[in-house]
Amino acid sequence: MQIIPLFKVSDMRAAIRYYTEVLDFVMTWPDDTADSPVVDLGHEQTELQITTYENERLFGSVVYVYTTNVDALFTKYKSRGLDTSGKSNSPVHQGPVDQTWGRREFYVTDADGNTLRFCQNID
């Protein structure tokens, strides 16, 4: 079984740029373009779909993404232009945070309110 989350986006071109240029995803379906209503994205073992279709209530989805080094990933994303100013009151959007539930996490929220929660288990 495999689960692939679907994020609603309002501007496909901007979303593709954000996910591919800042967050390391690549377009995985050969026929997808910026004019496609649904685009398949992949990064290592992670898959994600973004769509301009679907119900307006779909905005604001949340997905956990497990990784081996959240600190290095956050640093890389910041160097590529990840803007954290829109969530200045959220420490977990400003950089990796050790959570009481045993994970080190940082959150990335796109322009449409969809959030990727990058995390790794604390040993």
Image: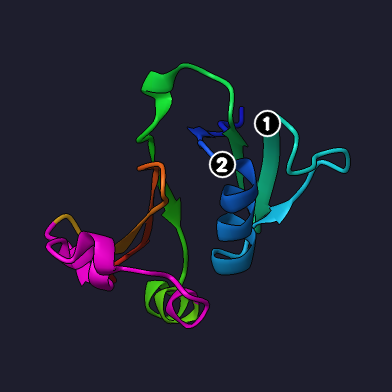
Give the residue displayed 50% in from the left and 35% down from the top.
Answer: 7
Amino acid on which the number 2 mark rests in the picture? Asp
**Secondary structure under the numbered disc 1 in the rendered image:** strand
Name above or below for residue 8 compared with residue 105. Answer: above
Q: Residues within 10 Å of mark 1 (few under 14, many from 20)?
A: many
- Residue 69 left/right relative to 27: left
Q: Is residue 103 visible?
A: no
The magenta-colored residue range is 77-100
Is 115 included in the stretch rendered in magenta? no
Give the residue displayed 43% in from the left and 70% down from the top.
Answer: 82
- Residue 112 left/right relative to 102: right
Question: Which circle marks residue 11 in the picture?
Answer: 2
Residue extending farthest right: 30
Give the residue displayed 43% in from the left and 74% down from the top.
Answer: 69
Gap in angstroms between the C-alphas marked 1 and 2: 12 Å
- Residue bearing mark 1: 38
Is 94 included in the stretch rendered in magenta? yes
Instruction: Assign the C terminus to one quadrant of the image.
Output: bottom left
Name above or below for residue 30 compared with residue 14. Answer: above
**Secondary structure under the numbered disc 2 in the rendered image:** loop
Q: Position of residue 87 (x, y in %)?
A: 22, 60
